[in-house]
Image (cartoon, helix red, strand yellow):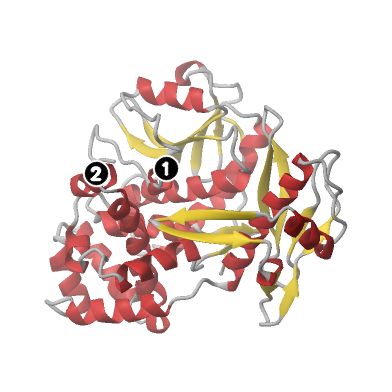
Amino acid sequence: MPVSDRGVLWVAGVAARWVAVLVVVAAVLGLAGGDCLAADRDGLTKFSSRFYTIYSGLSKAETKIYATHMDLVFAEYKRRFRSFRTRNARPMPLYLFRTREDYVTFMAKQGIDATASGGMFFIRESAEGLATWTEGFSRSYVFSVLQHEGFHQFAHAYIGHHLPRWANEGLAVYFEQGVIAGNQMKLGMTDGDRVRPVQNALDENKAIDFDELLDMDGFEWNDNMQTNPYVGHLQYDQSWSIAHFLIHGEGGKYRKAFEKYLILVNKGRTSSKAFGDAFGTERTDGFRERWEEFARAMRPDPFTTAVGRMKFLARGLRRLQEREMDTPRDIGQLRESLREIEFRIVQESSGDKYELTSMDDETFEYERSNGSVGEFLLLEAAGGGQPPRLTAPGLKPVPTATWTRTADGELLVDMVYR
């Protein structure tokens, strides 16, 4: 995925990964100019929200959901990076396609082969913008794609063209993991799928050299993705880990220096020179050691852990329905049914394999925000033919696993937060 410049593509990490702050913003969504403006954008309808010009193949109601969500996310980008000012205050272009075929076809017209991507921020002479499609994906997944890719778009407009690849991708992953409940965006989670690979790499002496990562350009980054999948994945995880450390490590001690670093690279300094000037050291040895200590001590946060277990249990509920077994009425019955079929899933992240199993009692439990432990709660299905929903009272925000269906009738688990 080449780094951006005029006529060159900037592809983001969500697609490339092989595929808590109060914000008050109102998305004002309507037809731009009164009538549907579709002819110049491949049959897409043009809408306007507070921060985006949206070219959409979705209905107005569906488009409004994504517009409202991304306006909240964009407001958070701006709040977090308020020291930076855009060179162009016009709304950001956002392309929402219904199908993958429509997305790939449109991107091909821009001279971009998007067949291996799930969404991207792109720049071409003919058009530029943030683009993805929705069919076959849960809404929460599309949100995460847009949050990741949307940061690349924001960074290009506000932070500048010279943002080092590690910082661009690390921060994009940081925002990708955020969730919105009402008008609040929760950030700073520590997903085990990111934490474990970094810790394993450190333990096995396979971590990417710190200075090498700081200076890595887009061409080397992309070459790693194509030729060395392990390093390709680890680039994202390790970059996120460093960014997380700079934001949250030692009580936020490094935030101001991190911002100064971004300002300096925006002014044209090399990544290494900017890092030394911002953090007051020509050598990164001591800093690297503090990051490694931080990374080794990181633990998956209770919220993200609970959401991961809910997704696993939801997949179990779908499996029970596929086998036409009795629908569980509570978490105890769900436990019995899943153990009867020995339900388990082996997942892999950055070469790290781990198993989720219904035989583990912790799979059915979660840690509440007050530190106490509770069991997940089954709720009755929201619609006919759907499995029960799952929720976790006592978490902030409260996550609920719900269900949607694809155009082909396939059940998808979706996460909503309140």
Residue 401 image point, x, y percent: 71, 54
Q: Quadrant of the C terminus?
A: bottom right
Along the polypeptide, which appears first: circle 1 or circle 2? 1
The amino acid sitting under disc 1 is Ala
**Mark 1 Cα-neighbour bin, 10 Å: few <14, some 14–19, many ≥20:** some
Q: Is residue 262 above or below residue 143?
A: below
Q: Is residue 385 left or right of residue 362?
A: right
Which residue lies under the disc numbered 1? Answer: 15
Q: Is residue 16 above or below residue 276?
A: above
Question: The residue tagged with tag 2: helix, strand or loop?
Answer: helix
Which corner quadrant of the image does residue 363 belong to? bottom right
Disc 1 to disc 2, how far (Cα)? 17 Å
Could you tell me how many numbered marks the image carries?
A: 2
- In depth, the one of 64 and 1 nearer the eye is 1
Which residue is at the far top?
Answer: 39
Residue 349 image point, x, y percent: 43, 56
Residue 35 image point, x, y percent: 60, 21
Report if the CB atoms under discs 1 and 2 are less than 8 Å apart.
no
Which residue lies under the disc numbered 2? Answer: 227
Q: Is residue 367 in view?
A: yes
Of tags 1 and 2, the one toward the viewer is: 2
**Residue at horizontal 15 percent and vertical 57 percent from the top:** 268
- In depth, the one of 105 and 350 nearer the eye is 350
- In depth, the one of 254 and 393 nearer the eye is 393
**Residue at horizontal 24 percent and vertical 44 percent from the top:** 227
Which corner quadrant of the image does residue 244 belong to? bottom left
**Mark 2 Cα-neighbour bin, 10 Å: few <14, some 14–19, many ≥20:** few
The amino acid sitting under disc 2 is Thr
**Residue at horizontal 52 percent and vertical 50 percent from the top:** 144
